[in-house]
Amino acid sequence: MRELPKVELHLHLEGAAPPAFVRGLSKEKHVDISGIFDARGNYRYKDFWDFLKVYEAATSVLQSPEDYRRLTLAVLEETAAHGVVYAETFLSPDFCGGRDLGAWREYLLAIQEASDEAERKMGITLRGIVTCIRHFGPEKARETAICAAETAGDWITGFGIAGDEKAGAPKDFRWAFDCAREAGLRLTAHAGEWAGPEGIRDTLAALAPERLGHGVRAIEDLALVDELAERGIVLEVCPGSNVALGVYKDFRAHPVHELDRRGVKVTISTDDPPFFHTTMTREYEELHRAFDWDEGQFRRIAKVSLEAAFCDTDTKTKIA
Ligand code: ADE
Ligand code: ZN
């Protein structure tokens, strides 16, 4: 399972920060965030909303481009160790320079430097998806979209939205998505994780993304499942994340198998691996155990994922 070549489309860069790395930085910078760790040194949170707070506290120790360069290397080392050959990571100008365009460019350069180094040394290719945070509101999302549009290119390939799905409505973020689309960025949106089918329908209507982060609660409306399959909307499914946060009680109760069976394009990712005690290897092992997914199925998923990746075709050809 570990060796199978994998493609991961849904990975938050700060959410992938190893707790030891974050603890080390907090000591270097004399920031007391000891409350976010449990006795074993893992991240501790009560529910999704508490998880978002812990995530933001952990992120508070990432204060410079150099911190993000080190973070990116640490994350890619861990990701590559699980057979991932291509990954897309969510990046937020909110955390990287407070949406100031000049600062954002500096953070981005440092992250890309680490990405290039990891590609040379570990053979993993990374691309970035600039992400606004829904509960930070539409005005900040606009500024984020401008940062994204100004740096769109070979490396920044997409734009998305994460955060609290219950905050605001998708249409509040239409301007940001239109701005990103006009700059040539590909679009994805977190939906159908905490909100049900209506949240997915509203997101598709208002923002027209080609991929959905999670999207799994579409299963509650089979007409919507058929629509996703017909339109070829790709789901970035993160089963371990959904189980850890209590969306489903275990892997067997997760709809990923049924969504796949009904013809929806599903891909598999970890979301925020250390927060959810997961890795791509563990996701594959659990899916094998729960649904008897075999090597052929995993190779098919990796192919669907690479096709749905936001990078250019030359990059895809090199990876395939
Ligand atoms: N940010 C990081 N992980 C997230 C998740 N699972 N849902 C929404 N926003 C997030
Ligand atoms: Zn996510």
Image (spheres, rainbow, N blue to C red):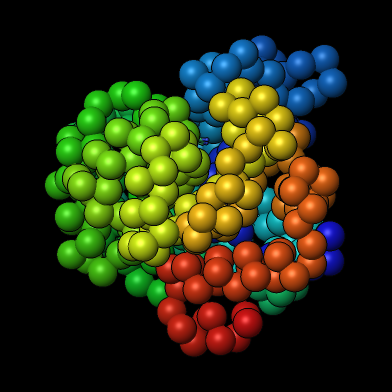
Asked if residue 283 lies left or right of residue 59, the reply is: right
Give the position of the C terminus as an image quadrant: bottom right
Question: Which residue occupies 75% across, 70% down?
Answer: 296
Closer to the camera in the image, 118 or 31: 118
Residue 182 drawn at (x, y percent)? 18, 64
Among the 4 quarters of the image, the one containing residue 143? top left
Residue 121 drawn at (x, y percent)? 75, 73
Question: Which residue occupies 58% across, 56% down?
Answer: 261
Tell me how many marks there are: 0
Asked if residue 113 lies left or right of residue 147, the reply is: right
Residue 119 drawn at (x, y percent)? 66, 72
Give the position of the N terminus as an image quadrant: bottom right
Question: Which residue occupies 76% across, 16% down?
Answer: 38
Location of residue 128 with respect to 289 vertically, above or below: below
Among the 4 quarters of the image, the one containing residue 129? bottom left
The reply to whether residue 235 is visible in this rendering is: yes
Location of residue 224 with respect to 196 vertically, above or below: below
Residue 108 drawn at (x, y percent)? 44, 58
Location of residue 289 with respect to 113 vertically, above or below: above
Asked if residue 49 lies left or right of residue 164, the reply is: right
Question: Which residue occupies 62% across, 80% down?
Answer: 319
Closer to the camera in the image, 3 or 292: 292
The reply to whether residue 115 is visible in this rendering is: no
Location of residue 284 with respect to 23 vertically, above or below: below
